[in-house]
Amino acid sequence: MPARFCSLVLGLCVASAVFAQARPPVPNVVLDHMDELDRRCVAAGGRAGAGRFVVAQDFTGDGRLDYLLSEGDYDCLGRPGLFRPGGVGRVDIFVVDARNAARRVYSDRLVGYRVLAGKPAKVQIARQGAACGAGSNPRTQCAAQLAWNGHGFGEAVAVSDAGAAPSAAAPVPAAPGVGAAAGSPPAPLVVPPAARSRFLAGCRQAYVSRSADAARWADEQCVADWGKVTESAEATDALLAALPASAGEAVPLASLRQRLAGVRWAARPRSRELSASGRLGKFEVSVTGSPAAKTLGMSWMEVGAEPPYDIVGAMRVRGVTLTEIACEEFGAGEWQRVFSGSAPGRAPFRLELGQRIAPFANSNSYYAATIDLSGRPPAPAVSKSACSNPSNLI
């Protein structure tokens, strides 16, 4: 049993939630569910991996840890996709009482979910096809935010990209005290089950195409590169959530702050040039423009460490098309890149990225991404420069 605790993660996909109290023992009903997944994996001819599929957070606001189990994130070595047939996986939420006894209060089959920091933590879910309700087609995607009502989880805010006729489309309900001045945020883009295998195959081909010698080390490097993609998930989802749905649509600053519920917004912007600022995990968040937001930026800096992020890769595995229109190198490990982007349900956008790997142990490394929220596609550069640095250039 101790080995199973490597799958228990405090705050997976959650921005820096800190608990002062000691973590209580995991309730038996939660452990039994984890053991049942192990049993089913072995029975299918696989073996339990080290994947993270449990989130421990306070989802009800009572100060106690509750548990979310995502079967689709369970790592069954040798049988990938066992618990995610057709790209859909079951998600269960167990609520814990004062006796540390847990009961299952939510269970559904989803194409994706994410947890947002807060008191209580919020859970956003994504469905597809008939699960989105009347008027949906197999390609329909819809999303909702769950809300604790004292007995279970209802859907407080819902959005959908259903292609139904206006007469069949239900109005989007708003949470109490939340306005809808700029319309609904776009539905979250989910990572398909086969994304990792496709990424690793494409990554290896890219390295080997540059040098045949890379065949000896490409597989190991690509696994590390995939780690950067997964580390970028929260920042990537926030950048994509901020985009307007169509060209010319303004995103008011107040609406942007509501969309990015995982950001811990500062009481005042940290500089005069910004209209808002805050933190999302290890990223500093910065917004320009008011009353409509113009840009949204995510920046990370640390002394002596290699940047652990790849937002370009994270966007691409979510179905975003990115075309590089400019790239400039400033030395080994330092570059700036500009992309023209298009994503389902969103207006075209411009993405600027900058990275620097510290040349000395006491120097700063940084990684920064800024997305334009005007809804206008960027003009291509007059002459596109090329970068040869292999870091994050796949």
Image (cartoon, grey):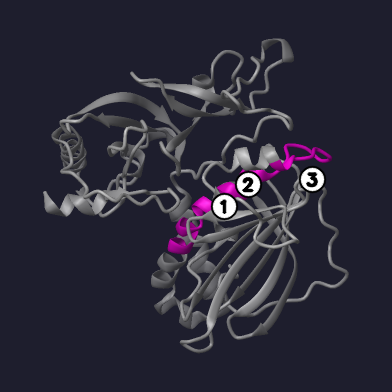
Determine the secondary structure under disc 3.
loop
x, y percent for residue 387: 68, 77
Residue 196 vertical placement versus 149 (above, below): below
Q: CA distance from mark 1 to mark 3?
A: 17 Å
Determine the secondary structure under disc 1.
helix
Residue drawn at the location 48% of the way across and 43% of the way down? 192
Task: Point out which mark residue 240 bears.
Answer: 2
Query: Which mark sits nearer the N-terminus, 1 or 3?
Result: 1
Q: Amino acid at mark 3?
A: Gly
Query: Dot 3 corresponds to which residue?
Result: 375
Quick check: 174 left or right of 51? right
**Residue 240 sits inside the magenta stretch:** yes
Residues at circles 2 and 3 in contact by the CB criterion of under 8 Å: no
Determine the secondary structure under disc 2.
helix
Residue 83 vertical placement versus 197 (above, below): above
Q: CA distance from mark 2 to mark 1?
A: 6 Å
Q: CA distance from mark 2 to mark 3?
A: 12 Å
Q: Which residue is more in the foreground, 24 or 74?
A: 24
Residues at circles 2 and 1 in contact by the CB criterion of under 8 Å: yes
Quick check: 277 left or right of 199? right
Query: Which mark sits nearer the N-terminus, 2 or 3?
Result: 2
x, y percent for residue 224: 42, 68
Range of magenta residues? 226-253
Q: Is residue 344 visible?
A: no
Q: Amino acid at mark 2?
A: Leu
**Residue 151 sits inside the magenta stretch:** no
Query: Dot 1 corresponds to which residue?
Result: 236
Residue 98 vertical placement versus 241 (above, below): above
Q: Residues within 10 Å of mark 1 (few under 14, many from 20)?
A: many
